[in-house]
Amino acid sequence: MKQILLVLALLYTTYLSAHIGDRIDREVLIQVAIENSNLAYLEKLFPDTKITPCAKQFQLWTVEFPSAPPMDYIQKLKHDGKIKLSTRNRKLETRATTPNDSFFSKQTFHLNSFNPGQSVTSGINSVGAWDFNKSGVTAKGDTIVVAVLDFGFDSAHSDLDYFINHNEIPHDGIDNDDNGATDDYKGWNAGLDNHSLDGSENDHGTMVCGGIGAKGNNKIGVTGVAWNCKLLPINNIASIAKSIKALEYCLVMKRLYALTNKNKGAYIVAINYSLGAEGLLPEDAPLWCIIIDAMGKEGILLTAAVSNQSLDVESYKDMPILCNSRYQINVTTYNSITLGLDKSAFSNKFVHIAAPHNYWGTLMNNKYGTYKDGASFAAPLVAGTIALMYSNFEVRLLDSLHSNPTFVTQKIKEAILKNVDVTSDLTNKVVSNGKLNLFKTISYSRFLHDSIYKKKDTIFNSISQNSHNIQANIYHSEKNIYIKKTNQRPLTISIYNLLGQAVLQLEVLDMDTKIDLQNLNEGIYILTANIDGHHQSQKIVLE
């Protein structure tokens, strides 16, 4: 404690005039143990600073110092036993330039036309996909919502259908629905905690929304991928702290929807994230990755735009791309002529798919125009794809998604990557080796439940002890085992080959676990799950 106070005193003396430099440069995100997560404790630990809550569910606080703390001080904080994690706050930047004005009729990326000599369509084949369900509502009556974390929105654009939070009274300065946000009636400003959707870059958020879900077949403007989904604009995402705060808001809204039997919150299925920060690794901002994982466990996929540099993302570092969560789809751009990369980053490890980017869409002041180059506008097309998939899911899959979101959400991601158009110029440049094909993806998603739960995917249910109703769901798919527990009791997993030899044994304590079986040879094995002496065995086939 004395060392920390000494460092603070030296900082304050060295930078005698308060508030030197950009405010964000003076902010550090601090995560503390749950028992220490209170303002009084932090004010004693960090005197002469401004302390505000960032994400309460993660015990995360923003500490603003009189001047930018040096990096060695940040490291000292990480070694203090009373602090779990610390991260310097950073500004985020949009991933696209200002667009030129154009008109709707040239949205050729939606078509299924072929270029001379090419065997796959130059666009994403939306026209075929729209022959299927595009209602914007699931088979169970859930209104499908895509959250858009960005900068500035045209809140009155006639071609954008924003989500309305009917449990909030607009402009009264009160958090009426107790979701942690004030006046979030038609979107929310994460920086100001109010209803303001205006910003210095209004066109950026407006354009992103148009790619996802501009209203289709309404005789005006343009058409987004998911015609009838609702758009939840979250404004002013100008730093890591504000970004995490916005992500937490999405998490709360999805949980509220489930906990209140659909009476509060929102059925958020995807979050579009067309911004980021270069020069960072996951260890520099671990909370960013942690909360993306938390989203996936609630059934929310994040689509992220890569940087507009024609480089491998590993060469310059990029966040949140390098989080590479199982619930994250990183999107780059492709050229509609060559069907290869187009001025954006790539990686066969961290970038999953390519999509169009310089297309026609919605602009500020109820106008339309051509979007310029930028992965900012490729990622929204994938977010819209997720929304359109939900319109076409069977009830069986929606039920499985509710009971096992960790497993099924990953399968939704896999479905998008499995149904790309593979091109020679994208092979080994992105994980999927190809570009988005909306028709193939939606066609496949209509029968996704059957493709997930085919014979080689073994399902164990209700491994239970009669007196305590202990349950665990265990799924085998390809060379992975997925486990979802409903209690804290330890679960022992054993895998035996046909000679009776144990090839894997481990104790599972976490509620959600994935076991990688890539090191095992193809063949037949016996999996045994044991809870408190009660066990169940099943044959699994590794192919």
Image: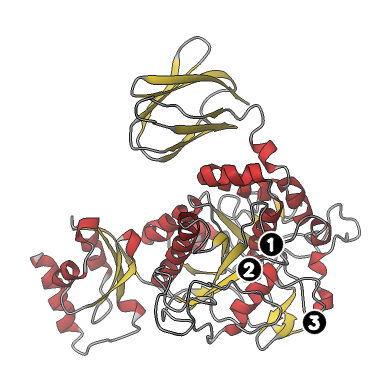
Say which label, 3 or 1, has the lower sequence index. Answer: 3
Q: Amino acid at mark 1?
A: Gly
Residue type, mark 3 in image: Phe
**Residue 438 in the figure: left or right of residue 86:** right
130 w.r.t. 404: above or below: below
Quadrant in which the N terminus is drawn: bottom left
Task: Determine the residue positioned at 53% across, 75% down.
Answer: 187
Question: Which residue bears the numbered disc 2?
Answer: 230
Q: Quadrant of residue 390?
A: bottom right
Residue type for callout 2: Lys
As drawn, 101 above or below 301: below
Q: Disc 3 versus disc 2: distance between alpha carbons?
A: 23 Å
Horizontal relation, residue 243 to residue 524: left or right: left
Q: Which badge, 2 or 1, comes first in the chain's sequence?
A: 1
Q: Are marks 2 and 1 in contact (CB under 8 Å)?
A: yes
Which label was assigned to residue 136?
1
